[in-house]
Amino acid sequence: LSKAPPLVGRRVAIGGLVSRAEYNGKHGTANSFNEATGRYSVALDGHEDLIALKPANLTIAPGSIPSVESAASPLAAGTAPTAVATQPPGAAATLPPGAAATVSLTRDEQPD
């Protein structure tokens, strides 16, 4: 598996820009990483623009979920590989810090 940089495929928040301060506080998606320049290509929300930004000017946006490609790498996801577990009804599950869970309900378990 290739090891994608940690932000590729993730929603990011932009900050700390001086010469292009108008982008600070904006959000977008890190589409790719150019190793030669050390910058991410970021597609801004609501714009057709792609801008090249240093990692220092990007943070993972709240609620960001990695794409399938970037999640394939533990480096990209920043966590251990994903595991699937089935819990009996009413059982509690404990996740490690920073882990995310997806819950699927069967028809019998659907809330009213």
Image: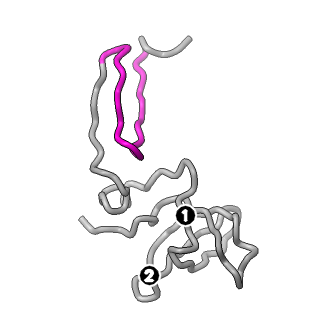
Provide the residue span drawn in magenta: 88-107
Which mark is on residue 43? none
Q: Residue furthest right?
A: 22
Q: How is the image coloured?
A: one colour
Q: Type of residue at label 1?
A: Thr
Residue at 42% over, 35% down:
102
Q: Quadrant of residue 89?
A: top left
Residue that mark 1 sits on: 59
Q: Residue furthest front?
A: 97
Mark sitting earlier along the chain (2/1): 2
* Quadrant of the frame with the C terminus: top right
Q: Type of residue at label 2?
A: Asn
Residue at 76% over, 74% down:
22
**Residue 17, above or below 62:** below
Secondary structure, magenta segment, majority class:
loop
Residue at 49% over, 59% down:
10
* Residue 97, horizontal then vertical, whole percent: 39, 44
Q: How far is disc 2 from disc 1 in space, using C-alphas?
A: 17 Å
Q: Are marks 2 and 1 in contact (CB under 8 Å)?
A: no
* Quadrant of the frame with the N terminus: bottom left
**Does 95 lie within the magenta span?**
yes
Which secondary structure, mark 2? Answer: strand
Residue that mark 2 sits on: 34
